[in-house]
Amino acid sequence: MQETTILRWPAKILHRLRSLFLRSRVDQELDDELRFHLEQQIAEDFAAGMTPEEARSAALRKLGGVEQLKEDCRDSRGVRLIQDFVQDVRYGLRMIARAPMLSLVIVAILAIGTGSGTAIYSLIDACLLHSNTYPVVDRWDVVHAYSPKQKMFINYLSVPEIFEVKGLTDVFEAVGAVHGDSFNLTGGDYPERILGTHVSANAISMTRVAPVLGRIFTDAEDRPGGPPVVVISAELWKRRFASDPNILGQVIRLDGVAYTVIGVMPAHFDFWGGELWIPLQLNPADSNRSDRRNWIVSVLHKGVTEEAANARLAVLAKQLEQQFGATMPEYRGWDLRVWNINEAVIGGVKPALLVLAFAVGLLLLISCANVAVLLLARSTARMREVAVRLALGAWRGRILRQMLTESLVLSLTGGALGVCAAYACLPVLVRLIPEEWLPTAPELVRINPAVLAVAAGIAIAMGALFGIVPAWQASRQNLVASLKEGGSKIGGDRVGRSSRNLMVVAEIALSLVVVAGAALMVQSYRRLEEIDLGFRPDHLLRFSISLPETKYRRGEQIAEFCDRALQSIASLPGVESAAVVSGQPMIDRTEDLTSREFAIEGRPAQDARGGENASFRIVSPGYFRTMGIRLLQGRILSAQDGRDAPRSAVISDTMARLYWPKGDSIGHRISLGQQFGRRDAYTGGMTSDAPLEIVGVVADVRQTRVLEAPLRPEFYLPLDQQESAPRIMAVVVRTTSDPAQLTAAVRKAIASVDTEQPIYDVSTMDEVVADSFGPKRLTLFLLVFLGSIALLVSSAGLYALVAYSVSHRRHEIGIRIAIGAQPGHIRRLVLLQGVRLAALGVAAGLGATLAATRLMQGMLFGVNASDPVTLLTVAATLIAAALLACYFPARSAVRVDPMAVLRSE
């Protein structure tokens, strides 16, 4: 019996497929079969002695009604629901075609909503949900320390500290060490600066990502004196080596050292942001705790929370304080913590995307409410059709389903157009985010199948949301009243009016939230643009150089290279001046800043300000003039601050006001202590501990990519006086014309000093400043766009409601005019209806806005999330937009001809 049932299934499926796709043929076969049975029965009855008429009547009675039998046969095919759905879709398309302008407006509103949602979700999917596809991403952490003494996080730790953390096997599944670097790759047609990473042998393997070619490092290769080997990225393999399948075993030269390629990682494997990886080769016997140059990366055991890991690290920090706190003050109060790497990577862009997602969600709700109002207004034209169908016996559920299907047709059409718009706009949105802020490769931000599924879900949900109220309202109408009145009262009952009014109030309230968010962001952006950068970014070219240790071992060699390079650049036509500075001004993150402890001579030991910490920069003569940094007191560093001159320093205004509030910092002397930050970015040991004399005070300079970050105390040291000189430097060039046009000439000028020295990260300082706005620029652009659309859509919804009300009340308005009502009275009557709804929406929206805008407080600068001036301005704008939306229906009401209205009644 079971085998027979199984064998019947293919025949049933085939029959149902034929019924769906060959319906006419199957219906013709059904007609032929019924005709055959009818003729057979007639022939039998005629042979039994009946007349032809009697035989036909008897045969029809026995069959029980041909049309009913046909319907029963069609129902037995099991495809009735699908056929009804197709029929509803066709009918819905016809109804859409009958009102093309209204349908076009609805589809456009839905396309904007769906397109915005699709584009923002694509960014969220690539940047937040799948920015890091490592299997251990949820347990992959950095271990860093917070030092109360320096009031900052210390991300670079020493070799002994790495091995001490590595010993916490009860918490960590694996512990490794890394530090980023850059290398001069030579041997090709031109030298190229490549970002890379020094990694411990287990650092790559802990990501659980295998190479596509070759292998990763062994423990033997990660020991001091191990062989020079390198693993390269798929992107470098493709770009530099044309995807050579025989790359394994080839030798490439990095900073003049020959490295053997042993592996190629998969595409988009951007571990620590580099394109190649070489063994770190830590020495377990290294006991120097002050030499901090590596990050600690770790994988927590499954089931171990970050809170548990922090508790265990706190025990280790306490042990270090007890053991070394007396001789190393930085251990006092040390707080070791874990920091999830994925959260660190996406942290810069996450708040912006979440705010935009919230705004898009509100826009979708506004769109749904607006379309529902438009469909409710359109239902007036279909009242008699629905009433007649109900009178003829149509099932109310069938009417409801058909109208919902029409809504889904509109929403899916709008959704398809929205996805197309998202395809076109997404690259533009990606370009609005500077690459250093984007936590994934730009080409990975795309509309993939998961995004398309979300877009389809958005479209279907919108169709159900905006379609349910009009469909329910139409199917629940008073049948007798609709037929008696010709449908003029459809939707005119209290429930219909309340539904429409509630939707308009809701969309105005939601629009206020979005527009207020955009207005706050505009205010914040203006305040950011007004920030005093402390220098003049115009006509300023900047680029980076990194001098390899194999060629430039001593500070004197670096200073000599810089002198020759700056002379060569200064001789170029169109160049006013040039200088070098350690680090990357306006590009560095806060954790990239290098700082040093210092003590002020003459301050008593018990003075809390006697020993402090400040960021520092090493600069060449002419740096302040080239950058346009204002001198406030004393003098700037110049050529007179040479190697044999007394040691000198220039401090920032913040440092001067903090430690010498009386303004008497000039002439005071400070002694430098321990350095914090990347020690490998500097040559040799520490510069002489001889005291420095403060010779000048300059204006504060915004040094990090986060413009609104608090200013830190900072001092500047002359390059020529540094035994420990920076290897990684930025060169700044002040020009008389467009600085970007000098790029090729500057590249040749550097090559004239060292042919193997490439320059990289070339840009104008105006571009650097623009990029520093980062996600705020994206948020501003999209919030202004979404706010404008929300304002337009809510105004359109109010216009539709008031216009519908005017058309519904034409008879009343005609009578008012006939008995002497003045045009101003009629106009005021209509305007007040819209203004009341707008006022209710604004009142409800202000409360929602005060709650919602708190979510974006962290993104605002110089303006409070509940700024009353901004909120009142936005409220007034919405009221003004409501008056404008109501003006046209009011003008139409004034022009009603009472005689024509009365005659029509």
Image (cartoon, rainbow, N blue to C red):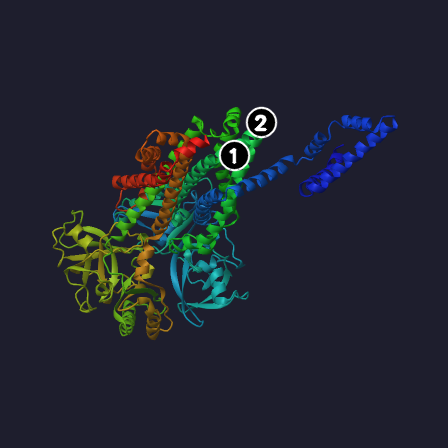
* Front residue (pair 733, 500): 500
The residue where tag 2 is placed is 391
Q: Residues within 10 Å of mark 1 (few under 14, many from 20)?
A: some
Q: Residue 47: give x, y in percent of width and height.
A: 88, 28
* Front residue (pair 369, 557): 369
Residue at horizontal 32%, vertical 42%? 516
Looking at the rendered structure, the secondary structure element under dot 2 is: helix
Residue type, mark 2 in image: Ala
Answer yes or no: is residue 356 visible. Answer: yes
In the figure, 240 relative to 332: above or below? below
- Left or right: residue 752 versus residue 480 is left
Q: Which mark is residue 7?
A: none
Looking at the rendered structure, the secondary structure element under dot 1 is: helix
Answer yes or no: is residue 292 visible. Answer: no
* Front residue (pair 746, 315): 746
Residue at horizontal 84%, vertical 27%? 51
* Front residue (pair 54, 97): 54
Q: Residue 395: give x, y in percent of width and height.
A: 59, 28
Residue type, mark 1 in image: Arg
Q: Residue 709: give x, y in percent of width and height.
A: 28, 50
- Left or right: residue 288 versus residue 472 is left
Which residue is outermost to the top? 480
Image quarter of residue 851: top left
- Left or right: residue 486 versus residue 825 is right
Q: Residue 733: give x, y in percent of width and height.
A: 28, 67
State the quadrant of the C terminus: top left
The residue where tag 1 is placed is 382
Q: CA distance from mark 1 to mark 2?
A: 14 Å
In the figure, 91 relative to 224: above or below? above
Q: Residues within 10 Å of mark 2 (few under 14, many from 20)?
A: few
State the quadrant of the N terminus: top right
Labelled pair 1, 2 in contact (Cβ < 8 Å): no
